Image: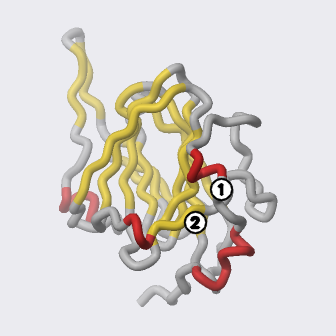
Amino acid sequence: MRVIATELPGVLVVEPVVHGDARGFFVETYHAARYREHGMPAAFVQDNRSKSSINTLRGLHLQLRQPQGKLIQALEGEVLDVAVDVRRGSPTFGRWTAVRLSADNFRQIYVPPGFAHGFCVLSPIAHVEYKCTELYDPASEIGIAWNDPAIGIEWPVRDPLLSARDRGHRTLNELLDSLPRYTEPA
């Protein structure tokens, strides 16, 4: 597998080795020791899967009390997946990175704790699966406005399909006091 560092420390793009022939393909989508060697945790405790239609935007989400690291991949279709550094005091606070994940390119993105996450569906349908380092805790989940001008994410859709919850998220500046603090790496 090939692991590509992004401009946000800890956010990694994974390109697994795909073995294909006339029958189809085989790909190893997770191997604890190999992922750990590249700075991703060896322990994921929950897997989630979503199905969404074109122009759906999910996010930007994070948990405060039980911050989740996420390893995300598209099993069907294509999405633009986004990570935003929301750790107060971080040298990259408020910056974002994006990668296209699709069933055809097999790419994954690892989004560490302390980052908000979201994605936008580019294909008619997308099935997205992600592994989480902590269990879902709805009481500690917060969201940041997908279109926060202070972040300036270049989403490929101007009028996305949003959940009622995602429509009501506040901006990064409005949430500043509740966001996690950055700690220097050891």
Disc 1 element: loop
Left or right of 184 in this view: 147: right
Write down the residue under mark 2.
8
Rendering quarter of residue 87: bottom right
Q: Does residue 37 appear in this view?
A: no
* Three-letter code for the amino acid on which mark 1 is drawn: Gly
Few, some or many C-alpha atoms within 10 Å of disc 2 (few <14, some 14-19, many ≥20)?
some
x%, y% of residue 113? 43, 71
Q: Find the residue positioned furthest to the front.
A: 164
Disc 2 element: loop
Q: Find the residue positioned furthest to the right.
A: 149
The scheme the figure's colours follow is: secondary structure
Few, some or many C-alpha atoms within 10 Å of disc 1 (few <14, some 14-19, many ≥20)?
few
Could you tell me which residue is drawn at 33 percent across and 62 percent down? 136
Answer above or below: position of 3 versus 184: above
x%, y% of residue 98? 60, 49
Rendering quarter of residue 96: bottom right
x%, y% of residue 54? 57, 26
Could you tell me which residue is drawn at 50 percent across and 88 percent down? 183
Q: Are marks 1 and 2 in contact (CB under 8 Å)?
A: no
x%, y% of residue 181? 55, 86
Could you tell me which residue is drawn at 40 percent across and 28 percent down? 103
Could you tell me which residue is drawn at 26 percent across and 50 percent down? 47
Which disc is residue 168 wearing? 1
